[in-house]
């Protein structure tokens, strides 16, 4: 049993697993922020511009059915407004992730670019003199 626990500990403490866990936690919090932005900031003006429509209330009523208590009627409906809301949420999250990945790629691209090779250094006076001597000996 301790071998199993040691293997699990090695697995859980690997860099990739910890990074993924952090990503999932941050992603969950980010999802809530985006949902709030969509529900509280983006959709109200769109609904207002379309004549005061609240997208989450949009639905197609299919009919009514008797409730569990046997006395009340419950409406059966396709709530396509929620679908529209979730599509907008997804598009905003996808766009934000795209911007994040694009930013990360540009940062890593700058890191990976090799430095420009330095121009060869100017020969020293000693090297110039030795070159002249070599040329004079060649000419003789």
Image (cartoon, grey):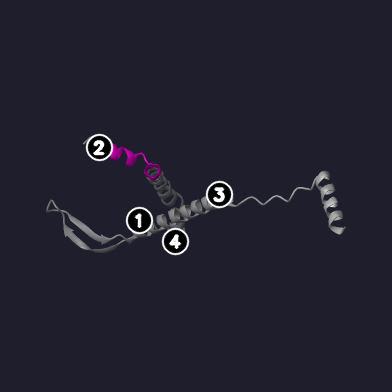
Identify residue for label 2.
3
* Placement of the C terminus among the 4 image quadrants: bottom right
34, 1: nearer the viewer: 1
- Which SS class for mark 3? helix
**Vertical position of residue 26 compared to residue 140: above or below:** above
Mark 4 or mark 2: name the one nearer the start of the chain. Answer: 2
Residue at 82 percent across and 48 percent down: it is 130
Vertical placement of residue 12 versus 49, above or below: above
Label 4, label 3: how far apart the Cα atoms are: 41 Å
CB within 8 Å, label 2 to label 3: no
Look at 30% across and 59% down and name the residue there. Answer: 79
Q: Which mark is residue 56?
A: 1
Q: At 59% across and 50% down in the image, what residue appears?
A: 110
Which mark is drawn over residue 107?
A: 3
Task: Tell which residue pokes out farthest to the top in this image.
Answer: 2
Quick check: 87 above or below 7? below
Give the main secondary structure of the magenta stretch. helix
Boundaries of the magenta span: 6-21
* Residue 108 position in % (x across, y down): 54, 50
Tell me the element at label 2. Answer: helix
- Front of the two marks 4 and 3: 3
> Which residue is at a point 52% across and 53% down the rendered structure image?
105
Return the residue at label 4: 50
Residue 29 on the magenta segment = no
First in sequence: mark 2 vs mark 3: 2
Q: CA distance from mark 4 to mark 2?
A: 63 Å
Foreground mark, 2 or 1, reads 2
């Amino acid at each position: 049993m301790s071998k199993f626990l040691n293997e699990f500990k090695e697995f859980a403490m690997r860099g990739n697993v910890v990074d993924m866990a952090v990503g999932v936690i941050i992603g969950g919090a980010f999802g809530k922020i985006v949902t709030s932005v969509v529900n509280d900031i983006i959709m109200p003006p769109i609904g207002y511009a379309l004549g005061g429509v609240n997208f989450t209330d949009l639905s197609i009523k299919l009919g009514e059915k008797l409730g569990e208590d046997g006395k009340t009627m419950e409406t059966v409906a396709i709530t396509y407004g929620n679908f529209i809301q979730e599509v907008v949420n997804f598009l905003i999250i996808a766009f934000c992730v795209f911007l994040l990945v694009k930013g990360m790629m540009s940062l890593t691209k700058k890191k990976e670019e090799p430095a420009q090779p330095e121009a060869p250094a100017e020969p020293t006076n000693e090297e110039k003199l030795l070159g002249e001597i070599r040329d004079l000996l060649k000419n003789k």
